[in-house]
Amino acid sequence: MNRLMTGFAVVGSMLTFLPTPVCSAASNTATTLIPLDGPNQLETHTTVDCFRADGHCDFTAGADMRTPDGVTGFPPSLWARQTTEIRSSNRLAYLDAHANGQYERVMKAMGSDEITSVYFGDGPPDKYQTTGRIDSTDWSTGQPKTDVNVIVCTHVQVVYTGVNVTSPSTCAQTTFS
């Protein structure tokens, strides 16, 4: 019995030296579906991943059409405007958002950023999404602020032949890990 315990102690102590992941993230994803035309649904989704190591988050907010055959893009006559709001419930956090799309504009306000994206025509589902980075800074020190929550909400207005609909907000929320 002593040998078993000794062997277990050796194996247990060896486990403490195994490599740990270099960078982990706290993540959250949210999805909302609403009816469009016939059996089709408008799907909006947000994802946010926050990294404590350097006080930044990566986000994705998008829309697509869910048909009985699966997820697709939109028809050629599409015009859509997506609004994505990034904020924290902590008023001392300054969240600085940067988006990567072609037709996007970022409006910065005290404590929240709003990204407006415009989409035209048909294409694959990933055409209708915005991605970017959020840097969290403490207003009083200028240092990364990682003891806060980050909220990413999006809604989209979709217009194409016979359809004009605005989705409700879809929000993902997480903290830094």
Image (tube, rainbow, N blue to C red):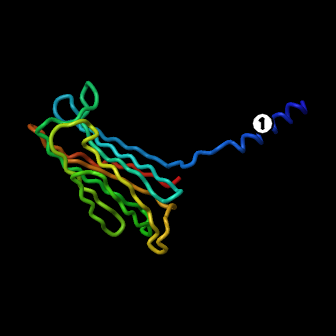
Position of 95 compared to 12: left or right?
A: left
- Residue name at image x 35 percent, y 59 percent: 97
Q: Is residue 123 left or right of residue 173?
A: left
Q: Which residue appears at 53% of the width and 52% of the height?
A: 177
Q: Which residue, given by chain and number where applicable, does mark 1 sit on?
A: 11
* Relative height, residue 15 to residue 169 (above, below): above
Corner quadrant of residue 127: top left
Say which element carries label 1.
Answer: helix
Residue 92, image x and y in percent? Answer: 44, 69
Where residue 47 appears, as percent x and y from the top left, is 38, 46
Residue type, numbered disc 1: Val
Q: Quadrant of the N terminus?
A: top right
In-image side of 159 versus 98 (left or right): left
Pick the front one: 20 or 40 = 20
Task: Count neighbours of disc 1 (C-alpha within 10 A) and say few if under 14, some if 14 to 19, many if 20 or more.
Answer: few
Q: Residue furthest right?
A: 2
> Does residue 7 appear to the left or right of 25 in the view shown?
right
Residue 72, relative to residue 45: is it above or below?
A: above
In which quarter of the view is residue 121 placed?
Answer: top left
